[in-house]
Image (cartoon, rainbow, N blue to C red):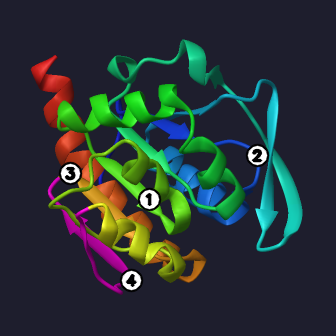
Amino acid sequence: MAELSGIRVAVLATNGFEEVELTKPRQALIDAGAEVKVISPVPGEIYGMHHHDKAGKVKVDLPLQQASQEEFDAVLLPGGALNADDLRDWREAQNFVRQADDAGKPIAVICHGGWLLVSANITKGRTMTSWPTIRYDIINSGANWEDREVLRDRNWVSSRKPDDIPAFNREMISVFSELGKQGRRAA
């Protein structure tokens, strides 16, 4: 795996995230040497889901309202329909991903997480994948949608579902290593 030492990753999430789509990529990033912070509009802890059932909780490291994308080199957006539907309505979350994308920072998104990119109005002309039920939201936002396990488009990595996590993690770490380190050198 690529070395991510010195790379700071922001995980934007709130209640109702798909548990494995946050915990497994976060652990893969930590194992590769990244510093990972969970950022949420909800203080304290947020709860995950295992499909339709509540699952474990994750500690929030930084309130969304105090977070700045300038403090991070890359962004991870886990899925979960409840999480993504709530997070996409937060102007601070929209601004965070918009500014990160404008700066060319890598963004990894899985499942329903793409809703935030749609709401941030940054998907036009991009190619991505997602959970199939949000493909029309992505297409209607001006993006191209493909049904693929993992897909890279410039600084973005997207994936569909929990079964895709091994491929998603490999590509995410590769892109974060390549682009996250470029951003660190430029700063």
- In this rendering, would 48 be left or right of 155? right
Residue 59 visible in rendering:
yes
Q: What SS does tag 2 mark?
A: loop
Q: What SS does tag 3 mark?
A: loop
Q: Position of residue 53 (x, y in %)?
A: 88, 69
Say which amino acid is labelled 4.
Glu
Q: Which residues are magenta?
A: 142-154
Real-space Cα separation, disc 4 to disc 2, in angstroms: 25 Å
Say which amino acid is labelled 2.
Asn
Residue labelled with disc 1: 114
Between circles 3 and 1, the one closer to the viewer is: 1
Real-space Cα separation, disc 4 to disc 3, in angstroms: 17 Å
Q: Are marks 3 and 1 in contact (CB under 8 Å)?
A: no
Residue labelled with disc 3: 155
**What label does residue 15 carry, if any?**
2
- In this rendering, would 15 be left or right of 2? right
- In this rendering, would 13 be left or right of 104? right
